[in-house]
Each structure stands twice: as C-alpha cells, then as structure tokens.
Amino acid sequence: MIRKILVGLALLIVFAATIFFVFAPKWAEESMNRIDGEPLIEVSAEAEALHKTLTIVDLHSDTLMWDRDLNVRGTRGHMDMPRLRDGNVALQVFSSVTKTPKGQNYDSNGADSDNITLLAIGQLQPIRTWNSLLQRSLYHAQKLEQAAGEASDLQLIRAPQDIDGLLARRKVKGNSTGALFSAEGLQSLEGDLDNLDVLYDAGMRMAGLTHFFDTDLAGSMHGLEKGGLTEKGRNAVMRMEDMGMIVDIAHCSHKCVADILSMARRPVVSSHGGVQATCEVNRNLTDDEIRGVAKTGGIIGVGYWEGAVCSTDPRATAKAMKHIRDLVGIEHVALGSDYDGATTVRFDTSQLTQVTQALMDEGFSEDEIRAAMGGNAIRVLSEGLKPLGDTAQ
C-alpha cells in the first residue's frame, strides 16, 4: 500500500512538473504580451509606399526574456525576425531583463523579490542563470548571437562601422536587420563595475542604470527611495561613455535623470516611454527633462502602450512624438516600443505602418517621418558607439 502511495505521488509530481515546464511559461507570456484587438487605423497607399522606404529603428524590446526562437514567426508576443521583416525594421535594440519585483507597479517597488528566477527555471534556462543576474544577461547575449548566426539577414551591431555596413547592405539586398544588445537596468553587474567589461565583451552597447527598483547605482522612478546617482553610479556613467556603451535614462528617477543629464558628455537616450505633457504617468519625461536630453544631442523613444501614451491607439504615440518635436525639434524624436515587455499594444512590429500613418495624420512631413522613425536613432547610435580599432579610454 505504501509503495502504491509513493508511486502515485511520484506520478503526480511528474505530471505537475510537466504541466509547469510545458505550459506555464507559454501561458505567462500569452497573458502578459498581448494585442488588444481594437480597430486599427486605415493605412493609405501613400503611407504604405513611404513606409517601405524608411530606415526604421526601435530602441527597446524585451523579446530575449521569452522562450521563443527569434527566427521563427511566433503565434504569441509582439516581435520576431519574420515580423521585423514585415514591418521593414532596419535596426532593433534587444534588451536584457534580469530581475523584476513581485507585484510590479509604477509607484513603489522593493528589490527583495524577483519574478525572473521562476521564469528562468520554468523555461529550463541553463542552471547558471537561475541565481545569477550577470549570467542571465550573458545568456540573453548568447541567444541573440545564436539567432544572428542562424539568419543571414540578422546582423549584430557593435560599432559605427556595423551600422554603415547594415545600411549599405539594405540598399543592395533590401531587408537586412541589425540587432543591438542592451540592458534594462544594470543590476546584472552584481555590484562590480568591472562586469561592465564582461557585458561589453558579450556585445552590450546600451544600458539603463535601473529598472523597477533602486540599485547601488541609482534610484528608480518606481523604487522606494527614488534617489539620484550614487558615487558608484557616476563612475558607471563615465565608464560607459568612455567604452562606447550608450546611457539610457528609461526608468531612472527624476533625480537620477537630472544627475545623468548634468554630467553627460555624449548623447543620452530615453529608450522607451512617453512624455508627461500628453500622458501624466510618473515614468514619463517632463518638459525640462526633454530639453535636457535634447541638450546632450540625444533622443526619446516613444512607446505604444497605456503606461507610455495613456492609450494603445497609434495616434496617441504620434501626439507624444509631436510634443517632443514642437518642444525641442524633430531631431530628438524616436521609437521605443517596449514590445514583449509585459505590455498590451494595438499592433505588433509587422504593423508599424500604423505609426507612419498616424504621423502623417498629425501633419509630419516626409523628412520628419524619416527622422522620427529611425534616422535620428541611426545618428545617435553611430555617435555613441566606439569605432572599431579605437582603444582610447
């Protein structure tokens, strides 16, 4: 009898484990990365034709976090290589998410819990990633490098020369896509600034200092203290600029943003979010912060989800972009989708003509649309990355 009970328990455990590992990660993503199904705006033949000629850059997606093959068209989420091709995306920034707090919200989060550990285990990622934030980022870098190795039209972007080569290739072959590796918060340093070199060697070329909680580098807009840069944070910013790793202020507290803008020597990026003038959410930039980013020569990537533009309607995205243009000039406007970042949107990356049409409807000229959809990002990324062969610090 005891043996039968033990066998029954073992079978129950195996069944529960199978359900967890096979279905739970898929269910989690399907419930978090949604398309709301609301009506799309009608796209004109003029917008379609213009869109096909654009050099489109998206400054932020979290696709590497999920257990999907980048080179296979997905049935869930917002982005993969086939859909990037459909959307005519020239360059996609892929972010590494290594830790998020339980009960995540925009107002106040501690650093004493983590959702990504369970996700890493549930997706059967390498054991080294289960208890190391650094190893999670290195695993994400490995995933991106593997995808590029398997797709002849996916090119890793690590230097200005790579961008030049990508653009030249697109002129000849059409639909090549560049991939730049970034970080959603530098908690992956695990307290050691020398790990910046480790991440750089793995291909990371952009990083935000914080995500949803305060770190030893800076306060988060969603943290408990919401402080500015620490001394270690200031050293991190200087090292990043010296090594050619672009500084991203997304998710930084207002004090952190002010500190970074006051010391920046190179263009600063706000990779994904919105502006408080059109959507009064605490994570969005004030007009003074927009002016500060512009003063560095930087850009602001505007997203497509509720927390960024207070709607999923592409017209709301266009209105936020228009505010930035009217305040500081078109040269500081960019896209930052936050696709696959536990966001609900109206359209996936294959349907980016929605943004092109919305910008046309807001009165943007053809040259302004070219700049906002990617031209500005190409300029800033080219300026921020270190050229091949440049060993100066």
Image: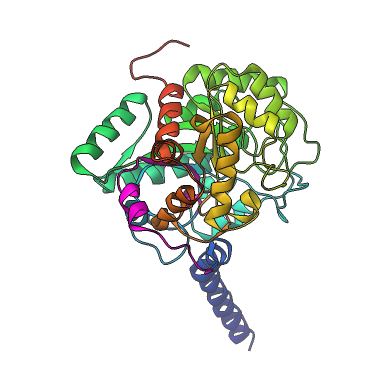
Residue 167 occupies quadrant: top left
Relative height, residue 124 to residue 220 (above, below) = below
Inspect the magenta stretch and tell me whether residue 348 lies in it.
Answer: no
Q: Is 50 included in the stretch rendered in magenta?
A: yes
Q: Quick one: 113 or 183, which is closer to the camera?
A: 183
Is 81 above or below relative to 283? below
Q: Residue at x 68, y 44 (%)?
A: 212
* Residue 197 pos. (x, y %): 49, 24
Q: Left or right: 252 with respect to 23?
A: right
**x 54%, y 48%: residue:** 318
Q: Among all residues in the image, which is located at the extreme right?
A: 225
Q: Position of residue 196 (x, y in %)?
A: 53, 26
Residue 102 in view (yes/no): yes
Going 46% across and 23% down the picture, which residue do you hit? Answer: 384
Span shown in magenta? 37-65
Q: Do we see residue 233 in this rendering? A: no
Quarter of the image with the N terminus in it: bottom right
Tell me where residue 43 appears, x and y as whole percent: 40, 59
User: Quadrant of residue 322 in the image?
Assistant: top right
66 lies left or right of 293? left
In terms of depth relative to the viewer, which is nearer, 109 or 273?
273
